[in-house]
Image (cartoon, rainbow, N blue to C red):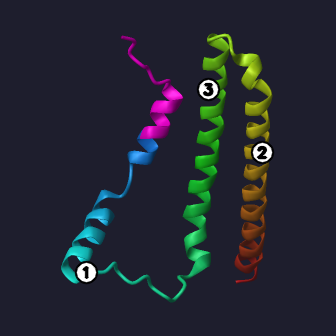
Amino acid sequence: MQESRLTNFQQRQINDKLKRDLEKEKRRLQNILATGQEEPRPSHPRNISLDQGPEERDRFQEVLDEIEERKEFLEEMTALGKGKQYHNIINTEISQKIRELEVIDKAHSAELRTIMPEKKTE
C-alpha cells in the first residue's frame, strides 16, 4: 500500500486553513450554547481610516507570501518534471499578484500624500 505524501505547498494550505482565531471561535460557541444564537454583529461601521493601515500592510504581506508560495510550487513541479505544465499558469498568477501589490502601494502612497501636506501646514 502506498503512502500519500503532501507537498510543502499543500501542507501550508492545510495549516493556513487550520489556523483560526481559536479564542474567537470558543467565544462564539460559548455564546451559542448559552443563548442559543450567535452574537449579533455590530451594525455601526468602524473608523475605516484607522483600520485600513494595518489591514493593508497585512494584505500586502499576504500577497507577498502568496507569490513566494507560487514560486516554491513551480520549483517543486519543475523538480518533479511537471514545470512546463504549470509554468504559464503560475506565472500568470504571480503577475496578477504583482498587479495587486501595485494597487495596494498606489492606495497607500495616495493616503500618505494626503497626510503629508496636513503635517506641513501645522
Estimate how packed mark 1 is, as few (under 14), some (14 to 19) or many (20 or more) residues with alpha carbons within 10 Å.
few
| Viewer-side label of 1, 2 | 1
Q: Secondary structure under badge 2?
A: helix
Q: Which mark is residue 8?
A: none
Estimate how packed mark 3 is, as few (under 14), some (14 to 19) or many (20 or more) residues with alpha carbons within 10 Å.
some
Determine which residue is flagged by label 2: 96
Q: Nearer the viewer, residue 97 or 56?
A: 97
Which part of the image, by quadrant, shows the C terminus?
Answer: bottom right
**Label 2 is placed on what type of residue?**
Gln
> Where is residue 97 drawn, in percent x and y?
73, 45
Determine which residue is flagged by label 3: 73
Region rendered in magenta: 1-14
The numbered mark, 3 or 1, whose residue comes first in the sequence reads 1
| The quarter of the displayed image where residue 41 is located | bottom left
Residue 39 as seen in the image, left or right of residue 52: left
Determine which residue is flagged by label 1: 36
> Where is residue 116 drawn, in percent x and y?
73, 72
At 79% across and 37% down in the image, what residue appears?
92
Q: Nearer the viewer, residue 13 or 122?
A: 13
Residue 60 as seen in the image, left or right of residue 84: left
Is 74 colored magenta in this rendering?
A: no
